Image: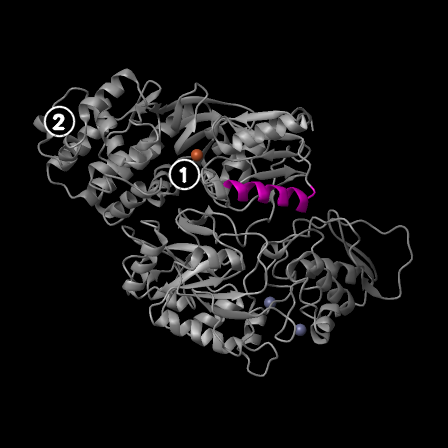
Amino acid sequence: MRPRVWQLARELGLRGRVRNDAEGVLIEAWGEAGRLEALVARLRVEAPPLAHIETIERRPLTAGVPPADFTIVASAAGHSATDVSPDAATCPACLAEIRDPADRRHGYPFTNCTHCGPRLSILRAIPYDRANTSMAVFPMCPRCRAEYDDPADRRFHAQPNACPDCGPRIWLEAADGTRMAEENAAAVLDRAAALIRAGKILAIKGIGGIHLACNAADPEAVAELRRRKRRDHKPFALMARDLAMIARHARLEADAEAVLTSPAAPIVILEAAGEALAPGISPGQNTLGFMLPYSPLHHLLMARLEAPIVLTSGNVSDAPQCIGNDEAREHLAGIADALLLHDREILVRLDDSVLRPAAGRVRMLRRARGYAPAPLPLPAGLNKAPAVLALGAELKSTFCLAGGGRAILSPHLGDLEHAATLREYRAMLDHYLALFEFTPEVVAVDRHPDYHSTRLGQEWAAGAGLPLVMVQHHHAHLAATLAEHGVPLDSPPVLGLILDGLGLGEDGSLWGGELLLGNYRQYRRLAGFDPVPLPGGMRAMREPWRNAFAHLERAFGDTDLRARFGDLAILDLLETRPLRNLRIMLDRGLNSPPASSAGRLFDAVAAVLGICPESVSHEGQAAMCLEALAASAMGEAQAVYPVRLEGERIRWRPLWEALLADCAAGCEAALVAARFHRSLAEGLAVISRRLAAAHGCDTVALGGGVFQNRLLLEGVFAALADSDLCLLAPERVPANDGGLALGQAAIAAAQSRSSSGT
Ligand code: ZN
Ligand code: ZN
Ligand code: FE
């Protein structure tokens, strides 16, 4: 911000100074009234690309003598609210330089400026200046230094500023560690591109981590990568050279283009269309996750290739992505044929962020590179609350630091059941607390006693003598949606429609499909899905047939389903299972906890339709495949399966009767899947509308991981479009447990005493 203020002030002939202080940017300016007005007006429209002006406050200067000139005041020690920003994709000016043969940065993979480049990923400590980044080991050459010192230059105070004379370098290594002897960056990139073209697998060190790459148009290379990575089903992300290349393989919606080309440059999930890529990229899906090059290295590599590349995180199965060169040599040498590395250290691991267009917005599914650590404003009424550290959930974990009117959500960290992820979570927590000089006054955790995050929070609160707030999982989902939409503290309760996998309920049972009435301070459960046992406990998460079995048992009891519906494939499958023992388990409640889970209902329907009934490799897999199957038939499907509230429970027998009758009548699986989506969306919308009216709510807030399902979300929006209800859905924060920490923080802040009466 400061150089732009300086430039504008000079142009307008103003005198004064500009500095960063703890709250933002402080400008002292003297000059004619009209010119001062012009400064404010132009600041709003001519702010630099990465700047985001929240407010401009003005007051007359009553003391002090105007200086002779306009100057930039160096930052004092201590940090400022404007200090740490997210990593930003290469800006057009830098891109033009690396493409210009006459420019001194032609072909240079680490070109950046104040408008672009690495930020959080290279940050060791605050304040954000070069000595505190992994660029500290590269002393600037005189030309770079001159740019850095010149307020009129695009690289004024660009901390990662570098050029081929003084900055980081790339090189290629064979899997055995032998360094390949290319003499310059262009030769290294030529060789890397040739390897990809030849069907090889390459590890590529980027901004927030090391990826594995191969030619996405080469089915054998993709299959080999999947085999070596031992990643069974999760879709691989893709990088394309430009929008035109994406448009060859996917349907590009206009709002998706804007997100793809934004400085955050995330992965956007698009509908596959046109020229097919390797089938192993996203098995069972009708979508492809694309991103555009976001560092000069990616731009220079993609310029040499004719097809998109797979660019998936460099790790084995579910371990965290590698960030260090030695780590990559150790863990990726068995997967990659060669490693494209560099000597700029990555200090903060940042996965690629993932968004998906749904119901008129491009919505966050995984929030990391390009978004973290940008703060989210806390809703009105919570800005004076004590500082809250909220620790999130177990899967898709993130934590949140809330205080001073803003919430800083950590990047996506992954599933804490993996020891390496848990270590990373602890390290990131320490890093964030130091970076933001954050001292928690309250700790918020999930009610589930076995989440690693809960235990960590309990230890923390006990050790520091801080109050611990235990937040019910689905209340936190509701509050996350309210908080990101800025619903103020003392707003009347809203109706929350939360569709989720599993979370521990108030009564000690597992919840997941809930209709809540609440706000930040309190909630109550108005209604919910009928609880259905999870036979085998957590094994039911991995084996969808178990949920089909439990749902059919619950709906039909002793009914002979074969007599009723004929020879359904699911009945054949179930007969191969130890049903006698399973029934005994259910009868006696042994290792089969009842759960009102929405996620498991999707698993059960998927299994009945023959979608990965035996086993899945990740929690959402069956539901994702069910959605993909349904997508092709949504146009012809009506909501014909009854979804009804009986008392306080939505019981599933009517839906199963109609659905199995369709199957028995030979109805195509895609149509059944589409009817299921429509019926659930419309049924839940009708129930929500009725409950909202009964309790005088004008707002329905959606939340929970099941709302990552585009068909379901759009179905609920469509079904409520003609109502007067205000519908809030997760957008900048994931609907899944990745957004939970924000909700926990808002609830703990609201319940803490000093937030009242402000
Ligand atoms: Zn730039
Ligand atoms: Zn230089
Ligand atoms: Fe959840």
Mark 2: secondary structure: helix
Name, please, the residue furthest toward the top. Answer: 588
749 left or right, relative to 628: right
Rendered image quadrant of residue 594:
top left
Query: Which residue corresponds to the image point at 30% horizontal and 18% vertical from the top-left?
Result: 589
Query: What span is colored magenta in the figure?
Result: 422-437
Rendered image quadrant of residue 140:
bottom right
Q: Is residue 354 visible?
A: yes
367 left or right, relative to 13: left
Q: Amino acid at mark 1?
A: Gly
Image location (x, y in percent) of residue 259: 48, 57
Residue 68 magenta-highlighted: no
Quickly name the residue at label 1.
705
Report the magenta stretch's main SS: helix
Does the closest atom of ligand 3 sit within 8 Å of the Cβ of label 1?
yes
Q: Amino acid at mark 2?
A: Leu
Image location (x, y in percent) of residue 251: 34, 59
Q: Is residue 747 visible?
A: no
Front in this rendered view, residue 8 or 668: 668
Above or below for 411 versus 253: above
Location of the C terminus by quadrant is top right
Above or below for 277 versus 697: below
Tell me how many marks there are.
2
Front in this rendered view, residue 524 or 170: 170
In whole angstroms, how far apart are the C-alphas of marks 2 and 1? 32 Å
Quickly name the residue at label 2.
561
